[in-house]
Image (cartoon, helix red, strand yellow):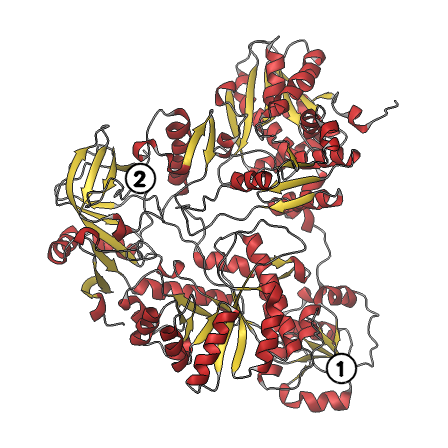
């Protein structure tokens, strides 16, 4: 199929029937709306295009910068569309909590500015309100910005009414439940409004994060109240999901269903099952439910790592020095500070300083070389890094970490030694140190 | 049930369990009355020192004097293995008087000549806030013929290649981008010894702390190319404390405030519907809280430990503690509020209970908001009420606490407090955890009302004794 513009690929996403053997509901057909198949990877592609398409030519004509408050998918989609038109894009964010999101925005060339944290010394003249910064930025730079404002822009609703809702309506003859994460609340509500024109009794259920918890792209119980588009009366129910459940849900989606959705999608799946499982057991007729798979799994590696570290450590090769027993470490050949200077002169060891490079630059023992510990760890895994005839002296701040490396290499037949008490002891005795720091000016 | 149970140390619960004890003191010494428990800050100091030990970090804890004027607390802390941070001539005198020797004192803040002179004479480390101040200090040191003065440079205006942050303006510190100009001056003035850099950030936000730390470490490294060898990084204080026992209660209250009180208007939790910073704008919640986050799920020492274990992107993601160790630097911290966690309570007598014009229940107390600094520093937590005639049947009721001046603004709480029983005149109301910034930070004898007397409470084998703050004997 041939397209002329990438924006033509936005929308018309597939609807996948979820295998009942996985979801376990007896009387409900569960469908997933695969919004992650949008060209930039999320449901926000629609939102971004919806907010820009009418104005994009005038933004270009007036040399404006597109401004948004987003720490994820909306920023990503806005940025890609802006770059097609050679328009700069800037996002002001209240902390990007998922590092990959920030990296991707940087790769795509977005300007990112973060808001300061809230003050702990309350000051009546300084109201700690993030919106104040955005208003100031817009006011101080008259006509410079086109502020998309996804949280209050009605076009965010309209595009989902027009496209997402219509697609679902066309795909299924009757819809009873729609589940969506509440972020800006635009996608779920917009789509639901369209469906309810036909299926009046359809229930719309919002998925929120639990208080004191964080699921990317969706808000918690209190935060959602601050969303301009949010209307609590619109929803027949709100389900609260924890970040742990969101991750489990995402893993079920990817590992059992082949749907590579992120934690927000996992939260929608888990939230839908939570809500439906009780209803399901009392049903006399078949019902149809839909949940939204809003974005992709790949940019949440660190998020999942933090919450389920076990997946990543299994079978990983550890640092060999950790296999040493306490006794083996204690037996590491050591050079005391009393004899160190003489010994270095006579034995001409290779002095290996295992600290970071900036620390090494600031001060080090004359004639030493810098192999920071992460590199050293890789080197000692290879048995042929050092000549066995070469004496090695390992140096670290306290002589504790270096002792392990000396012990490990000595056990493997190398002439490795530890500098006892390390550089802290060395300096405390006022023994000579060199520096290679030069002013950067 | 919208109670906000205050976090209360067992020692204070035990003390309050005998209600006639406190009633007698308030009757005798007057309302309001501040009670200090000097053992608490000493215990808190040890917890901070323990974080240094556990993380194998070389450094010092300085108690920031400014949150409280109590002499008993400073006297007790002078026996611990810590220093003190003073921000005025008066605080320096107080520290010396309490037994801190000059080398354990660090001076900060805007300084007049009197303060600088006394600091120099006692060989106090001076945190210098500007080049202008450095010249004045150097001049006074020369006049006093002081051969060696140890200073820290207070720095500000941090920036980072990895994160761009909107920063608020600050009046304090030397622009770190221009620090080399100061280094050049110090190169020529060897009687002034630069021992390190110091900063303070008015937020617990970790991203901003990381940037300030990275900037300062780099500036410390660069100093060596000017022949200077500073090795101290002082990251200040700002460690938060929790005023409440339960996250569930706090979350419930705040949701109720935002949702029912401000958005739906179905209940009123704030005085005259103020919203405490929140407002309803076409059905959407707008604004930001005028109160502080009263429930924090980590202690000051835990927060400190977390900072130590944070990776620094500008140093190849090495953790802060490791880079300190590798650079052979020393870390100083200046907790104030976190050192005074659970160190004091404020008691006041009930004057009257009445209805406001719009029907709210108001409990007037013999104390005013200057004695509780409730204007700038709003904590949402229930006080403990010592009822003279407790009732069998609890009947929860929402009240506002008001002060003893004839000003409409003199409200002690602008959020509704839910109590088990309506207080009566002569009952004693105890506000918890008031030692830091609350009990005497902004106290005045406005309208010639009492300022609170301070007493120190000593506990030995479950027996409590008291003395006036100034007569306290540390143990």
To which quarter of the image does residue B115 belong? bottom left
Residue beneath the point at 68% across and 14% down: A166
* Residue B183 placement: quadrant: bottom right
Q: x%, y% of residue B466? A: 19, 64
Q: Secondary structure at mark 1?
A: loop
Count the numbered circles shown: 2
Which chain is home to disc 2?
Answer: B
Across and down, in percent, residue A226 comes to 50, 32
In three-dimensional space, the C-alpha distance between marks 2 and 1, rounded to whole angstroms, equals 68 Å
Q: Quadrant of the C terminus of chain A?
A: bottom right
Q: Which dot, 2 or 1, sits closer to the camera?
A: 2
Q: Label 1 crowding class (10 Å Cα cut-off): few <14, some 14-19, many 20+? A: few
Query: Mark 2 Cα within 10 Å, few/some/many (few <14, many 20+)?
Result: many
Q: Chain of mark 1?
A: A
Identify the residue position indicated by label 2 in the image: B414
At mark 2, the secondary structure is: loop
What percent of the width, then of the height, locates residue B53? 49, 69
The reply, left or right, for residue B393 in relation to residue A51 is left
Taking the image as shown, residue A390 lies to the left or right of residue B53, namely right
User: Is B265 or A61 nearer to us in this picture?
Assistant: A61
- Residue A245: which numbered mark, if any? none
Depicted B422 relative to depicted A361: above or below: above
Instruction: Report whether B374 appears left or right of B455.
Output: right
Checking the image for residue A367, the label placed there is 1
Along the viewing direction, whichever of B1 and B179 lies nearer the viewer: B179
């Amino acid at each position: 199929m041939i397209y002329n513009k990438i924006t033509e690929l936005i929308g018309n996403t597939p609807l996948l029937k979820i295998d009942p053997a996985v979801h376990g509901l007896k009387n409900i057909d569960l469908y997933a709306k695969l919004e992650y198949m949008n060209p930039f990877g999320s449901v926000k592609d629609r939102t971004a295009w919806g907010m820009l398409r009418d104005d994009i030519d005038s933004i270009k004509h007036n040399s404006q910068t597109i401004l948004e408050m987003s720490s994820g998918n909306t920023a990503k989609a806005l940025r890609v569309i802006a770059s097609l038109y050679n328009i700069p894009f800037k996002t002001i964010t209240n902390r990007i909590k998922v590092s990959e999101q920030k990296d991707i925005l940087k790769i795509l060339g977005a300007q990112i500015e973060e808001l300061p944290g809230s003050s702990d010394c309350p000051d009546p003249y300084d109201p700690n309100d993030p919106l104040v910064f955005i208003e100031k930025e817009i006011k101080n730079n008259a006509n410079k910005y086109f502020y998309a404002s996804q949280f209050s822009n009605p076009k965010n609703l309209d595009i989902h009414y027009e496209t997402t809702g219509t697609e679902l309506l066309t795909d299924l003859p009757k819809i009873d439940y729609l589940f969506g994460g509440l972020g800006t609340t635009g996608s779920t509500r917009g789509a639901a409004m369209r469906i309810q024109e036909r299926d009046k009794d359809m229930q719309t259920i919002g998925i929120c994060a639990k208080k004191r918890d964080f699921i990317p792209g969706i808000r918690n119980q209190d935060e959602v109240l601050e969303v301009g588009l949010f209307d609590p009366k619109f929803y027949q129910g709100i389900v609260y999901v924890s970040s742990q459940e969101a991750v489990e849900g995402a893993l079920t989606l990817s590992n059992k269903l082949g749907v590579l959705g992120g934690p927000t999608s996992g939260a929608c799946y888990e939230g839908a099952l939570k809500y439906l499982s009780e209803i399901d057991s009392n049903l006399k007729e078949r019902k149809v439910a839909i949940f939204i798979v809003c974005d992709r799994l790949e940019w949440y590696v660190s998020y999942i790592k933090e919450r389920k570290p076990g997946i990543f450590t299994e079978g990983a090769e550890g640092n060999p020095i950790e296999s040493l027993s306490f006794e083996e470490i204690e037996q590491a050949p050591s050079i005391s500070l009393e004899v160190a200077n003489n010994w270095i002169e006579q034995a001409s060891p290779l002095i290996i300083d295992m600290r970071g490079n900036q620390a090494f630059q600031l001060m080090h023992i004359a004639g030493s070389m810098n192999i920071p510990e992460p590199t050293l760890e890789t080197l000692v895994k290879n048995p042929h890094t050092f000549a066995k005839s070469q004496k090695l002296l390992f140096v670290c701040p306290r002589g504790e970490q270096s002792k392990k490396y000396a012990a490990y290499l000595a056990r493997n037949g190398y002439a490795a030694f530890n500098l006892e008490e390390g550089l802290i002891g060395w300096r405390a005795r006022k023994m000579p140190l060199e520096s290679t720091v030069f002013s950067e000016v | 049930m919208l109670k906000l149970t205050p976090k209360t140390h067992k020692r204070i619960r035990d003390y309050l369990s005998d209600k006639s004890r406190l009633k007698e003191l308030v009757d005798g010494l007057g309302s309001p009355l501040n009670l200090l428990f000097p053992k608490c800050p000493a215990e808190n100091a040890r917890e901070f020192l323990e974080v240094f030990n556990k993380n194998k970090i070389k450094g010092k804890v300085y108690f920031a004097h400014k949150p409280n004027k109590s002499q008993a607390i400073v006297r007790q802390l002078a026996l611990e293995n810590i220093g003190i941070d003073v921000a005025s001539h008066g605080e320096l005198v107080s520290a010396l008087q309490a037994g801190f020797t000059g080398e354990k004192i660090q001076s900060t803040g805007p300084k007049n000549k009197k303060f600088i002179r006394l600091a120099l004479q006692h060989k106090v480390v001076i945190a210098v806030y500007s080049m202008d101040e450095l010249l004045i200090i150097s001049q006074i040191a020369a006049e006093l013929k002081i051969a060696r003065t140890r200073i820290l440079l207070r720095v500000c205006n941090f920036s980072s290649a990895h994160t761009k942050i909107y920063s608020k303006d600050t009046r304090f510190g030397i622009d770190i981008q221009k620090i080399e100009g100061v280094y050049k001056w110090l190169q020529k003035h060897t009687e002034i010894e630069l021992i390190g850099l110091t900063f303070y950030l008015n937020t617990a936000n970790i991203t901003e702390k990381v940037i300030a730390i990275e900037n300062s470490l780099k500036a410390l490294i660069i100093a060596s190319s000017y022949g200077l060898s500073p090795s101290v990084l002082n990251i200040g204080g700002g460690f938060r404390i929790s005023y409440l026992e339960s996250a569930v209660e706090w979350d419930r209250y705040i949701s109720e405030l935002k949702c029912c009180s401000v958005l739906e208007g179905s209940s009123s939790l704030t005085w005259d519907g103020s919203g405490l910073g929140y407002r309803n704008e076409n059905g959407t919640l707008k604004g930001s809280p005028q109160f502080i986050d009263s429930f924090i799920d980590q202690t000051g020492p835990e927060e400190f430990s977390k900072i130590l274990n944070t990776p620094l992107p500008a140093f190849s993601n090495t953790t802060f503690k490791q880079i300190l160790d590798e650079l052979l630097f020393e870390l100083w911290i200046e907790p104030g509020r976190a050192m005074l966690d659970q160190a004091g309570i404020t008691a006041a007598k009930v004057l009257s209970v009445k209805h406001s014009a719009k029907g709210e229940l108001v409990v007037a107390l013999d104390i005013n908001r200057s004695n509780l600094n409730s204007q700038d520093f709003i904590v949402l937590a229930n006080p403990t009420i010592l009822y003279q005639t407790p009732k069998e049947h609890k009947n929860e009721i929402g009240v506002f606490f008001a002060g003893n001046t004839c000003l409409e603004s003199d409200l002690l709480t602008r959020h509704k407090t839910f109590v088990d029983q309506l207080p009566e005149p002569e009952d004693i109301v105890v506000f918890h955890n008031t030692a830091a910034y609350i009990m005497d930070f902004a106290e005045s004898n406005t309208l010639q009302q009492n300022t609170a007397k301070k007493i120190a409470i000593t506990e030995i084998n479950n027996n409590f004794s008291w003395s006036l703050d100034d007569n306290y004997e540390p143990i």
